[in-house]
Structure formats: C-alpha cells, structure tokens
Amino acid sequence: MRIHDLDPENRPRERFLKTGPASLSPAELLALVLRSGTRNSNIIDTCNALIARFGLEKLADIPLSELQKIKGIGQAKAMQVIAVFELNKRIHYSRNLQRKVLSARDVFEYMAGRIPDITKEHLFVLHLNTKNQIIRNEQVTVGTLNASLAHPREVFKSAIRESAHAIILVHNHPSGDVEPSNADRQVTEILKQAGSFLQIDLLDHVIIGVDTWFSFREHSLLT
C-alpha cells in the first residue's frame, strides 16, 4: 500500500502537522526524510525494514554499502540516512562542549556515539581547560594503537595550540575487551612523560568497550 492510499489522518505528514513529531514512530520520522518509496514498497515499510535489521541506535554507524542492501534504499537514500544521524551527532557534540569531566564514567558517557566506526580502533584526545571542561575533542589516529601512530608530536600539537591545561586519551577496543595491551601501556607512559615536559597533564587514558571502560588512573597506572 502506498502512503497516498492511507487515510489522511494516518499519513505521517498529516499526523506530524496535527499532533507533532512525538506522535510518530521512528520509521515514520525517517520516512518523512526519505519521502518516497518504490513501486512495490512504500517508504514506511522500507524504514521499518531498516530499523528491524540494524536497530535504531546502530543505524548511525552503518556504512553506505550495508544500507544499500535493504530493498528500496539506493545510494541517495542511504546518504540521507547517514546525513540525518551525522547531524544528530554534531548537535549532541556541540551541546556537550564545555562539559566538565570528573571521572572515567564521564568520559565514557561523553564519547558514546562519537566513534565513527566501532569495528576499527580510534584514538581521541580530549583537551581540557583549568576547570576540567572539554574545549576540544580531536581524533588523532585510526588503527591499532602503538608508539609510532600516537607520537607525542601529533597528540600534543593541537593541545598546545588550544592552550589546553590537560588532556585525556580515549581509544576503543573493537573486541569489547577493555584490558590494556602492552602497547597501550607503553604509549601511555611515553605520552605521560611528554606531557610532563610540556606542562600539559595527562589526566587519564580511558579504553572504551561496548558497555564498559578501563581507566588507567582509576587502576593506579597513571599517577
């Protein structure tokens, strides 16, 4: 059944205008963005299929090629889906700048949804002011963390430019196991020494898994 074949009061656009966006399901909201379906499938059914396959939360991280495997989703619609979720990430990011970080949990919650591809390892550096507020979040490397990738020059370059008082390292383990590797420990020690020389404190190194984290400071590995 096409959208136009529905009773007017059941069409997403008309319900949006009458009762507001909160009255629509996630699939209906997404349908308003994508607008049109195919000859054999209306756009609400297509959006329901998208959400059923990937889950609403994970849609933000699904690559273009995977989205296009859903019937009715071509390149243009896949780009629209990614653009919507990317915009949401940026809104969330802008609202959380100047957020105060007092614990590894704060770091974990702040970074939720900010890792663009959880199947790869990413290193981020949070720049903090004297009040422990985040003034910048910078992605430094992509790939397995080691001393050559996480060179002090790259890690501290922006921190110096931003006049950061301190930094926090954050990286993810795609496996979900947050236990630090020998390379993680080595990199942390090197950057701790570099920070001491530059008078920019390395407050913590937080490793993120799926739903947990490891803090070097909370485990007395960074004092």
Image (cartoon, rainbow, N blue to C red):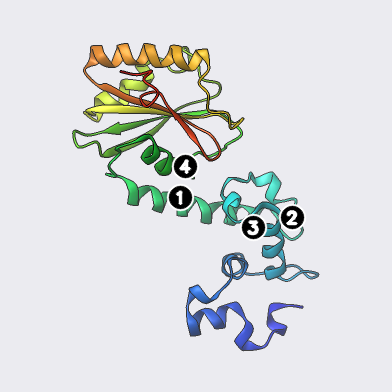
Say which element carries label 2.
Answer: loop
Amino acid beneath label 2: Ile
Whole-number angstrom distance, CA of label 4 to CA of label 3: 23 Å
Residue furthest toward the front? Answer: 219
Residue at which label 2 appears: 70
Question: Does 19 appear above or below 29?
Answer: below
Residue at which label 1 appears: 89
Q: Could you tell which of marks 4 and 3 lies nearer the N-terminus?
A: 3
Whole-number angstrom distance, CA of label 3 to CA of label 2: 11 Å
Residue at which label 3 appears: 77
Amino acid beneath label 4: Arg
Say which element carries label 1.
Answer: helix
**Looking at the image, which residue is at 67% across and 88% down?**
7
Residue at which label 4 appears: 114
Query: Answer yes or no: do the residues labelled 2 and 4 have beta carbons within 8 Å?
Result: no
Amino acid beneath label 1: Lys
Which numbered tag is attached to residue 22? none
Whole-number angstrom distance, CA of label 1 to CA of label 2: 23 Å
Disc nearest the viewer among 4 and 3: 4
Disc nearest the viewer among 2 and 4: 4
Residue 176: horizontal and vertical position, in percent?
58, 32
Say which element carries label 4.
Answer: loop
**Looking at the image, which residue is at 79% across and 70% down?**
39
Q: Could you tell which of marks 2 and 4 lies nearer the N-terminus?
A: 2
Instruction: Answer few, some or many: residues within 10 Å of disc 4's Cα (few below 14, many 20 plus, some between 14 and 19).
Output: some
